[in-house]
């Protein structure tokens, strides 16, 4: 029989309160950042380009994750707690898989000089289908429940590493190697190109450069969660508030980090002014009016 009240895994309720506060603030920033990305991709019709659609899907995954992080505060078993746990599992896996798919597309676009747009439907099956399947597995042993200051897999290191941390850190290691290879290859190729390589430059501009920074953002924001989980494994009875706080900061900033990178893209940045935003919005609204009139 489980106790009715689940105390914070850090043993100090003030630590829990501080972590929840930081989580909510940063999750709110990531919600705003993810929504801004989705809105701008729609407003400027960037979704017409496959690379931008990949960013759209990643932004949706980050938005779901940030909303879940914002609402996740259950500390007792309940249907709400289980729902939060399932949504955390789905969203963290969706983010990771869309980063993998973006890296896969980067490799084929930059190295093989081929577009993977024809596989877009399979991207969706992987990016959304696999997370849903994985989220069902913990139900087989009733492992969802309070996990500190929110709900996820209860305090069972084996299950946590099997469902998330083990595959994640292995994938991150492989992603780092692939990303480093792509980065070196792109730098070498662009330094060798001359005026007769205009087609390659265009492919690079549309499909490679807009995506290069996003796997790096994910890799950088995965450092502190990795360090914290290593510390948990080595010293399971000596949790570090500082490492947990850094993990929460890193985990909650994915949407905001992606939004910052998105806004720094040259093609996006030059349109982030009041005149261009007004023109784009006016064009969008006028198109909607024409469609409604034609339908009537």
Image (tube, rainbow, N blue to C red):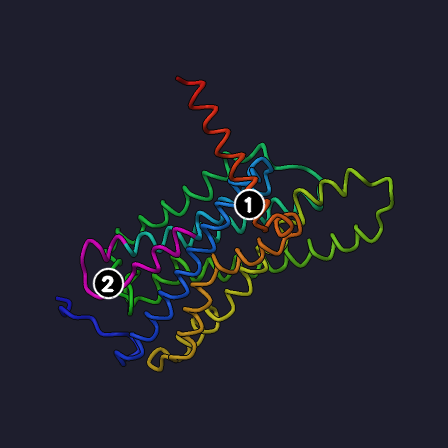
**Position of the C terminus by quadrant:** top left
Q: Is residue 18 left or right of residue 82?
A: right
Read off the residue under disc 2.
74
Is tag 1's residue or tag 2's residue first in the polypeptide sequence?
2
- The main secondary structure of the magenta stretch is helix
Front-most of 10 and 217? 217
* Residue 3 place in picture, x, y as percent: 14, 70
Numbered label attached to residue 244 = none
Residue at image coords 39%, 54%: 65
What crowding class fits label 1: few (fewer than 14 Cα within 10 Å), some (14-19), or many (20 or more)?
some
SS at mark 1 in the image: helix
In the displayed structure image, the side of residue 138 where residue 284 appears, left or right: right
Q: Of discs 1 and 2, which sits in the foreground?
A: 1
Number of callouts: 2
266 relative position to 147: left or right? right
Quadrant into which the N terminus falls: bottom left
**Residue at the (48%, 49%) spot, across then down:** 59
Q: Which residue is mark 1?
A: 277
Q: Is residue 126 left or right of residue 267?
A: left
Question: Where on the picture, by quarter, is residue 13?
Answer: bottom left
Tag 2 secondary structure = loop
Magenta segment: 63-83
């Amino acid at each position: 029989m489980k106790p009715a009240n689940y105390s914070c895994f850090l043993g100090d309720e003030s630590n829990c309160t501080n972590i929840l506060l930081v989580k909510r603030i940063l999750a709110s920033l990531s919600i705003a950042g993810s929504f801004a990305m989705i809105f701008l991709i729609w407003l400027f019709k960037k979704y017409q380009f496959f690379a931008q659609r990949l960013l759209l899907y990643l932004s949706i995954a980050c938005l779901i994750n940030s909303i879940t992080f914002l609402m996740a505060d259950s500390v007792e078993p309940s249907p709400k707690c289980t729902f939060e746990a399932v949504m955390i599992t789905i969203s963290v896996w969706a983010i990771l898989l869309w980063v993998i798919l973006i890296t896969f597309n980067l490799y084929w676009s930059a190295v093989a000089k081929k577009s993977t747009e024809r596989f877009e439907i399979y991207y969706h099956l992987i990016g959304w289908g696999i997370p849903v399947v994985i989220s069902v597995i913990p139900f087989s042993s009733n492992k969802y429940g309070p996990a500190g200051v929110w709900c996820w897999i209860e305090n069972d290191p084996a299950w946590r590493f099997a469902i998330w941390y083990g595959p994640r850190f292995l994938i991150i290691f492989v992603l780092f190697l692939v990303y480093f290879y792509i980065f070196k290859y792109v730098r070498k190729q662009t330094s060798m190109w001359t005026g007769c390589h205009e087609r390659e430059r265009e492919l690079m501009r549309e499909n490679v450069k807009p995506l290069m920074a996003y796997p790096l953002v994910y890799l950088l924001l995965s450092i502190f969660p990795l360090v914290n989980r290593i510390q948990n494994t080595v010293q399971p009875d000596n949790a570090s508030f500082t490492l947990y706080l850094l993990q929460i900061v890193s985990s909650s900033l994915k949407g905001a980090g992606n939004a910052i990178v998105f806004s720094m893209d040259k093609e996006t940045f030059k349109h982030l002014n009041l005149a261009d935003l007004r023109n784009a919005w006016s064009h969008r609204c006028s198109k909607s009016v024409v469609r409604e009139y034609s339908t009537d």
